[in-house]
Image (tube, grey):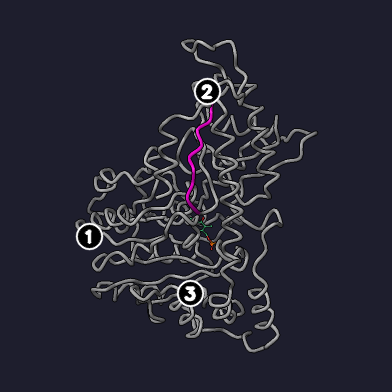
Amino acid sequence: MKPRSGWHVPMSDIARNTINPIRRIVDTIELNPHPDKQMIALSIGDPTVFGNLEPAKVVVDAVVEAVQAIKFNGYAPSSGTATAKEAIAQYTSTPEFRVSAKDVYICSGCSSALEACITVLANAGDNILVPRPGFPLYQTLAHCIGIQTKFYDLLPERGWEADLEMLDAQIDSGTRAIVVNNPSNPCGSVFGKEHLRRILEIAARRRVPIIADEIYNHFVFPESEFYYIASLTDEVPVLSCSGLTKRFLVPGWRMGWITVHDQNHVLKDVRVGLQNLSTRTIGANTLVQAALPTILSDTPAEFFSATLQLVQANAEIAFKRLSEIKGLKPVMPSGAMYMMVGIDMARLPEFETDLQVVEAMVTEQSVFCLPGKCFDLANYVRLVLTVPQQFMHEACERLAQFFADHYVQSDADPSAEDVAVGRADLEPAVTSDVRRVAGVGAD
Ligand SMILES: *Cc1c(COP(=O)(O)O)cnc(C)c1O
C-alpha cells in the first residue's frame, strides 16, 4: 500500500445514500413564520409535541418499576426476552388469529423492524413495492443498500385504496416484497377486509411476500375496523411491523416488533435472517421490554378511546371547515392521525408547487403542514390531527384567510368577481367526489 500523504476520510456509500426525503424537503423549505401569529405546526407525526397527549399512568408506572427493580440492566437476548415476546404474541392474537412467542422479533421502534424486514428479504438490485403517497422511510431504508422501490398508487377518489392493477403490473422478477401500510400515513385511510383480500390475492398469485407496516393497528375511528392483513390469508407469508410508538403515545421509547406469519413454512430461512440481523444491535431497550407485559395488557380501553376521540373530533373540524374553502379538497380519514388535503393549484396562479404554497402559508399565517411532495404526491398537504382542538380551529380559520387571499376564480365561473370564501351563500369547494370519498373512507 502506498503511504497515505494526508488525511482523506470520506463517508461511506451507505451513509451518503441514506436520505430521508422528509428531512431533505423540510430542510430546504423557507420557514419565516408571521411575527404576530403563533406558529401552529401540523407537520410532525409525533403525538407528544403539543403536550396534550400523555401515556397512560399504568404504562409510566410499569417502566419506573422496571428501572427501580435493578434487574433489567443487562443484555437481553438480541431478538427480545421470552416474556416480552409472549406479551406481544398475546396482545396480537385473537381467537381466530394466533401468534406465538416464537414468531416475535423485538426491535428498536417500528423503523428498525421495517429495516430488518426490508434487509432480510431483498438484495441490492432487487426491488420492493411501496405505496404512493406513502411513508418515505421505506425508500430511505431500501435505497441506501441498493434496493430499488417501485410505486403503486393509492387513489383519493376511492378513499385511498390501492390501485390494484398498477400493483399487479409493477411486480417483476426482482420484486421481493410488497409494503402495505394500513392504516396509512399520510392518508389516515383504513383498508376494509375486501380490499385487503384483493391485495392478498395478487400477492398469492404472484408469490410475493408482504411487509405490513401496521404501526397504527387499532388506531381507527369507531365506525372502522382494523384487520391485520396476515389474519386474512392462509397462504401469503407476511412480516407485520408494529410497536408502542403511536397507539401508546411513546415515540421516544423506541419499542417495536415484527410478527412472522407463515402458515406454510416458507420463511424458515427468513426467520434465521431476522435472528441474525437482531444481533447487529444486540437487541432493544430492556427496561421497556420488562414493562411490556403490563403495558400491553393493563392499559385501559378508555385511554385508547380518548386519543381516538380527539383525533376524530379534529378530523371532523378540519374536514367540515376546509370543505368550505375554495381551493381545498380534504379527504376524510378513518384512522391514524393524519388528513390529506388536495390543493387546486390551477386556481392559485401565484404558486407553482405545493412546496411554495406551504412556504407562503408559514410566512403569512404561521401554519405549517408537510407538502405532499414529502410523500411523493404533488398538490396535497398533510395535516397532523393530534393537536389541541383550539389550534385545529385556529389553523382552519387561517387557511380560510390564506385561500381567500390567493384563490382566483375560474373565468368560466359566473361568480368570478366574488372570491370571498367560506360564506354561506357560496357553494363550498367540495366536490361530490370528496363527499363520496368521505363515505368510502369510513369502510
Ligand atoms: C411513525 C411511523 C413509523 C415509525 O415508528 P417508530 O416506532 O417511531 O420507529 C413507521 N411507520 C409509519 C407509517 C409511521 O407513521
Callout 2: SS: loop
- Comparing labels 2 and 1, the label whose residue is closer to the camera: 2
Residue 59: x and y in percent read 63, 74
Q: Quadrant of residue 406?
A: top right
Callout 3: SS: strand
Q: Which residues are magenta?
A: 327-335
Residue 4: x and y in percent read 56, 59
- Left or right placement of residue 206 versus residue 417 in this view: left
Q: Residues within 10 Å of mark 2 (few under 14, many from 20)?
A: some
- Comparing labels 3 and 1, the label whose residue is closer to the camera: 1
For marks 3 and 2 on the same chain, the one whose residue lies earlier in the sequence: 3
- Left or right placement of residue 88 versus residue 313 in this view: left
For marks 2 and 1 on the same chain, the one whose residue lies earlier in the sequence: 1
Look at label 1 and name its amino acid. Ala
Q: Residues within 10 Å of mark 1 (few under 14, many from 20)?
A: some
Q: Residue beneath label 3, please? A: 106
Residue 46: x and y in percent read 61, 55
Look at label 3 and name its amino acid. Ile
Q: Which mark is residue 427?
A: 2
